[in-house]
Image (tube, grey):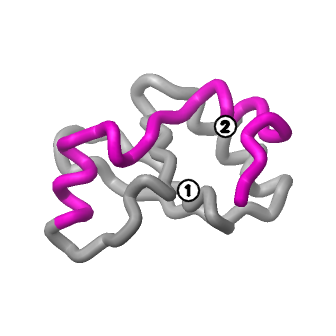
Amino acid sequence: MLDLTKLTKLNENHEWLVDNPDYSELYERIGFENMEDYLIVYSFIHNLKEVTNELIDNNIEFSHQSCHLSDESYLLINIKQ
């Protein structure tokens, strides 16, 4: 499991996927399981570049997605890795 205290940029710039209905409903429809295990980082309210750099520097897997509601994007990070 990720230790958010060691990942300062991610710790300061994330939301829980399960707490975001527009996104959690999207992933429920496609059969996504254990949404409480995922963080979401929005490009429009978080520092996406700094978070991405920190994730890459620490060899943490993430996915970059296009937002279905706007022209923005977001990252999904599984905290169980």
Tell whether position 68 is magenta: no
Residue 22: quarter of image: top left
Label 2, secondary structure: give it.
Answer: helix
Residue bearing the label numbered 2: 10
Label 1, secondary structure: give it.
Answer: strand
Nearer to the camera, 10 or 5: 5
- Which label number is shown at residue 29? none
Q: Are marks 2 and 1 in contact (CB under 8 Å)?
A: yes
* Numbered-mark total: 2
33 lies above or below 54: below
Residue in the picture at 72% in, 31% down: 9
Q: Earlier in the sequence, mark 2 or mark 1?
A: 2
Q: Position of residue 78 (x, y in %)?
A: 56, 61
- Which label number is shown at residue 77? 1
Bounds of the magenta segment: 1-28
Residue in the picture at 84% in, 53% down: 57
Q: Position of residue 61 (x, y in %)?
A: 65, 66
Identify the residue at the far bottom of this view.
Answer: 31
Residue in the picture at 68% in, 68% down: 81
Crowding at mark 1 (Cα within 10 Å: few <14, some 14-19, many 20+): many
Mark 1 belongs to which amino acid?
Ile
Q: Main secondary structure of the magenta part?
A: helix
Q: Position of residue 69 (x, y in %)?
A: 17, 42
Residue 54: quarter of image: top right
Q: Is residue 12 left or right of residue 46?
A: right
Q: Position of residue 2 (x, y in %)?
A: 72, 54
Nearer to the camera, 35 or 60: 35
Tell whether position 17 is magenta: yes
Mark 2 belongs to which amino acid?
Leu
Q: Is residue 8 left or right of residue 28?
A: right
Residue in the picture at 20% in, 50% down: 68
